[in-house]
């Protein structure tokens, strides 16, 4: 079973104060780029893996999705999603993505935001999602960028000219990585970009779009804390099709 850090009271108390949890999609600076990868939602059946508070599930319905299934390992997340959703076409369930099983051809769109890096066996999940999507179905997801994860516990370093450089620590060394983020020892699984994309290709997906998030000048002006994100990509964004 995957580590369920989101039901850790200390972790959840900090996590729920993040801008993307307080403001929803307006607080997620990568959302415009991710949204552009999604197909027109009208009439589509969607599954949101790691649905959190249900922001994307509700957006999908507002944009015409026929039905949305939101899955999350956290009881806290599912409880909050249900509290803030009044739509019978959205269903929320507790599910472990490491052991997930879905009906064949049940969905037209599979989406996930910043969740797959918690999954130990991404290749298995990719195969599961390929089976669960109808022919032509779309998979769109974001993960913590492997370059960012490989440096998470390292320290900023100053170049000779005083410019801060982001160090990379063992990028090619795949496997478990632990970091202190709202709580001690949060477990993530580091995979290179190549491993992630090849797992999708091996499962039968065609890669349609790949993005590496960097804030715009307008975003940095509105949120100066985003300036450091220009130094290295924080999120990897992928669009694929069955």
Image (cartoon, helix red, strand yellow):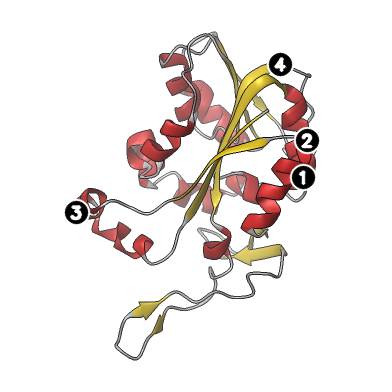
Circles 4 and 3, Cβ within 8 Å, touching? The answer is no
- Residue drawn at 58 percent across, 45 percent down: 6
- Residue drawn at 45 percent across, 59 percent down: 233
Q: Position of residue 132 (x, y in %)?
A: 74, 23
Instruction: Decide: is 158 above or below 30.
Output: below
Q: Label for residue 195?
A: none
- In the figure, residue 101 lies in which quadrant? top right
Instruction: Decide: is 208 above or below 103.
Output: below
Circles 2 and 1, Cβ within 8 Å, touching? The answer is yes
Residue holding disc 3 = 221
SS class of the residue under badge 4? loop
Q: Label for residue 123?
A: 1
Q: Where is residue 179 in the image (x, y as percent from the top left)?
A: 59, 65
Q: Which of 29 and 90 is in front in this view?
A: 29
> Left or right: where does residue 109 sit relative to residue 219?
right
- Residue drawn at 34 percent across, 91 percent down: 160
Q: Can residue 118 be seen in this view?
A: no
Q: Give the label, 3 or 1, closer to the camera.
A: 1
Residue holding disc 4 = 106
Residue holding disc 2 = 127
Pick whichever of labels 3 and 1 is earlier in the sequence. Answer: 1
Label 2, label 4: how far apart the Cα atoms are: 14 Å
Q: Which of 101 and 2 is in front in this view?
A: 101
- In the figure, residue 78 lies in which quadrant? top right
């Amino acid at each position: 079973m995957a580590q369920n850090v989101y039901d850790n009271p200390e972790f959840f108390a900090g996590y729920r104060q993040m801008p993307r949890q307080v403001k929803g999609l307006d607080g997620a600076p990568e959302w415009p780029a991710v949204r552009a990868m999604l197909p027109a939602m009208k009439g589509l059946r969607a599954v949101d893996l790691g649905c959190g508070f249900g922001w994307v599930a509700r957006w999908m319905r507002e944009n015409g999705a026929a039905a949305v299934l939101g899955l999350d390992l956290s009881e806290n997340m599912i409880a909050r999603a249900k509290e803030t959703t009044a739509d019978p076409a959205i269903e929320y369930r507790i599910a472990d993505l490491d052991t997930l099983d879905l009906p064949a051809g049940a969905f037209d769109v599979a989406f996930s935001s910043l969740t797959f890096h918690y999954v130990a066996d991404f290749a298995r999940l990719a195969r599961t999602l390929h089976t669960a999507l109808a022919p032509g179905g779309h998979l769109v997801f974001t993960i913590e960028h492997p370059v960012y994860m490989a440096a998470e516990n390292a320290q900023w370093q100053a170049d000779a000219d005083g410019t801060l450089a982001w160090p990379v620590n063992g990028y090619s060394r795949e496997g478990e990585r632990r970091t202190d983020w709202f709580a001690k020892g949060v477990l993530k699984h580091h995979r290179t970009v190549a491993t992630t994309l090849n797992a999708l290709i091996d499962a039968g997906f065609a890669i349609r779009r790949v993005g590496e998030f960097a804030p715009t000048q307008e975003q940095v002006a509105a949120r100066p804390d985003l300036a450091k994100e220009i130094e290295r990509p924080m999120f990897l964004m992928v669009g694929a099709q069955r």
